[in-house]
Amino acid sequence: MREKKPIIGTIVRVLDGALDGVQAQLITRTKIGYTVKLLETKDAFHKGDRVHLSMAEFRIHKGERK
C-alpha cells in the first residue's frame, strides 16, 4: 500500500500575525476549516502544536492540492 504524501501549507493572517509564515501540515479538513500541526516553533507556539484555522488562514502549497 502506498503512503499518502503529507499536505503542507503556510499560515496567514491569524492571531494578529503571531503565526504568519509558519509552515504546517494538514491533519483534518472540514466544511468550515482545517486542523493543522505546526512544523516549526514561533514565539509561544511550538513544533507539533495543533491549531484550528479557517480556510482563509491556511494556504496549501501548489502541487499539494487534491
Image (cartoon, helix red, strand yellow):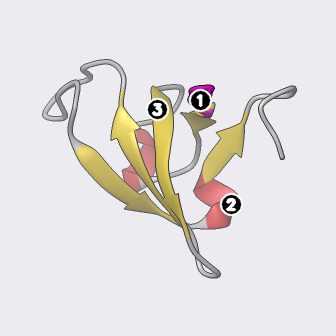
Q: Quadrant of residue 48?
A: top left
- Where's residue 64, x and y in %? 77, 31
* Category of crowding for the residue at label 1, using alpha-carbon neighbours closer than 10 angstroms: few (below 14), some (14–19), many (at least 20): few
As drawn, is 52 to the left or to the right of 5? left
Vertical position of residue 14 compared to residue 6: above or below: below
Stretch of the chain drawn in magenta: 1-7
Which of disc 1 and disc 2 is earlier in sequence? 1
Q: Which residue is mark 3?
A: 24
Label at residue 1: 1
Please tell me whether residue 4 belongs to the stretch shown in magenta.
yes
* Category of crowding for the residue at label 3, using alpha-carbon neighbours closer than 10 angstroms: few (below 14), some (14–19), many (at least 20): many
Residue type, label 2 = Ala
As drawn, is 17 to the left or to the right of 1? left
- In the image as oriented, which residue stretches furthest toward the front? 1
| Helix, strand or loop under label 2 | helix
Q: Residue at x 56, y 27 (%)?
A: 3
Label at residue 56: 2
- Where's residue 56, x and y in %? 68, 60
| Helix, strand or loop under label 3 | strand
Label at residue 42: none
- Where's residue 17, x and y in %? 45, 41
- In the image as oriented, which residue stretches furthest toward the bottom? 31
